[in-house]
Amino acid sequence: MLSQAIETYHALLTPDVARESWDQLQDQTKRRGLYFGEREIATVLRPRFLTSEQYHFLQRAIHAVMPAFGKAYRAALTDDALRAQFHLNDWEETVVREKFGFSEPSPSARMDTFYLPEQGILQLTEYNAEIPAGQTYTDVLSEVFYGLRVMGEFQKRYEVRPLPTRNQMLHALLDSYRQWGGGARPNIAILDWHEVPTYSEFVLYKEYFESQGYTAEIIDPRACEYKNGKLVANGFEINLIYKRVLISELVERGDLGLNHPVIRAVRDNAVCMVNPFACKILHKKASLAVLTDERNQHLYSAAEWDALQRFVPWTRVLEERKTTYNGATVDLMPFLASRKDEFVVKPNDEYGGKGIVLGWTVSQSEWEKLLQERLPEANIAQKRVALPEEPFPSFVDNTVQIYDRMLDTDPYLWHGAYMSGSLCRLSTAALLNVTAGGGSTVPTFVIEARNS
């Protein structure tokens, strides 16, 4: 049904419909500020479609693996040897076990995956446990795509359901704030550097929070002061931080370190921050190594271990050690050196595709040199996964051009328990990441053919 729906949608893009739809998309992009830096967020004329069965498959898969993530996190809080497998740095060791006032270390998170729905194959390649971006972009893009003429024609044949998420983000913030002990309606600070390319999403979030009756400001960490037990910025008293700045940048940018006003206020329990410092444990890319390593199988139930083996690609931290691969014992570093075309190397704590090397894109000598250079740096090696492709239409030189693009499926996770909504990024390059120039973002809709 999915391929038939895609073909139906593309057939509706007659010259007049395509031109009108493209002009509308361009107009709405400008009106609503849908840009990543200076680049348009959406550059294609079709959203991502999933059937109800495919969406529910994603939800079941996430539900199957999330208890294992929770067990690994809780065990790491008390087991020094296990926590060492995450390769936290010194300042992270200082703050990750401090109490933060609510139950889950990542009330809002995102699992970056590659999903081949027709084959029922799903691989979870990264867990963004610190703070995921894109919810408001995709929500607003859903509104925009609903208004396109081609979507109006498509809805005559298919029921089309959006997957809103900014409401979930607001609830995650407020639930955490109440557990933390906050009472009255909080002043919300959307906290990040003013020069980041996602600033336009902060504007959309500010508008949404205010539409729900909350006072919100976009705050640069450099503007914050902590005095008399209160965190303030430009006269704005902050009760609740929607933390979009990366914790590592907050600590390491400048010379304040853990003495940054925001960090001091959070550690003094003077302000509630979502997500808290504790999120750094599972945010480390080494978390997927912890989850799939035979050394830690005892942490999980048989069903959880089976789910991890099915949905999480084989991942290991680069180390001189023996481990198992497909049931056989291997010497890790020589094994990886001999399997260049089968693995990806990633830094333990980077974003935007930084430092990721796809083994099949470099020479054997470059690969071996890379492994040795990255060995002291707690990088991970991860089994290569299949990259799904779907045809997407662009409007170029007054014509519709349809060609295959690689795409990922990045479900949003809430309260460490369930999935609701998803980011989708398209690219013609194997590294699907907007920060790394990964092409277009599109909203995801669940569709069902109309009976009449």
Image (tube, grey):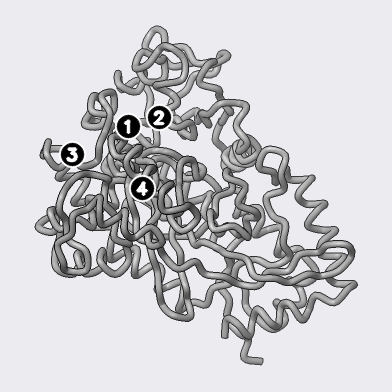
Task: Give the CA separation, mark 2 to mark 1.
Answer: 7 Å
Q: Quadrant of residue 429?
A: bottom right
Frontmost of labels 3 and 4 is 4
As shown in the figure, which amino acid type bears the numbered disc 4?
A: Glu
* Residue 204 vertical placement versus 272 (above, below): below
Residue under pointer 2: 247
Q: Which amino acid, mark 3?
A: Arg
Residue drawn 43% across the image and 38% down it = 350
Q: Are marks 3 and 1 in contact (CB under 8 Å)?
A: no
Location of mark 1 (residue): 277
Please name the residue shown 72% across and 48% down the image: 40
Q: Please state which of the two labelled residues, at mark 3 or mark 2, is closer to the viewer.
A: 3
Q: Are marks 2 and 1 in contact (CB under 8 Å)?
A: yes
Marks 2 and 4, the one that precedes in the sequence = 2
Amino acid on which disc 1 is placed: Phe
Q: Position of residue 129 (x, y in %)?
A: 37, 45
Three-letter code, disc 2? Ile
Pointers 3 and 2 in contact (CB under 8 A)?
A: no
In this view, the mark in front (4 or 1): 4
Residue 73 shows in the view: yes
* Label annotation for residue 83: 3
Q: Which mark is residue 368?
A: 4
Q: Is residue 150 above or below residue 190?
A: below
Give how far apart the Cα atoms at labels 3 and 1 are: 15 Å
Question: In which quarter of the view is residue 107 placed?
Answer: top left
What is the distance, in whole Å, between disc 2 and disc 4 at their CAs? 32 Å
Question: What crowding class fits label 2: few (fewer than 14 Cα within 10 Å), some (14-19), or many (20 or more)?
Answer: some
Tag 3 near tag 4, CB within 8 Å: no
Sequence-wise first label, 4 or 1: 1
CA gap, disc 4 to disc 1? 35 Å
**Residue contact at pointers 2 and 4, CB within 8 angstroms:** no
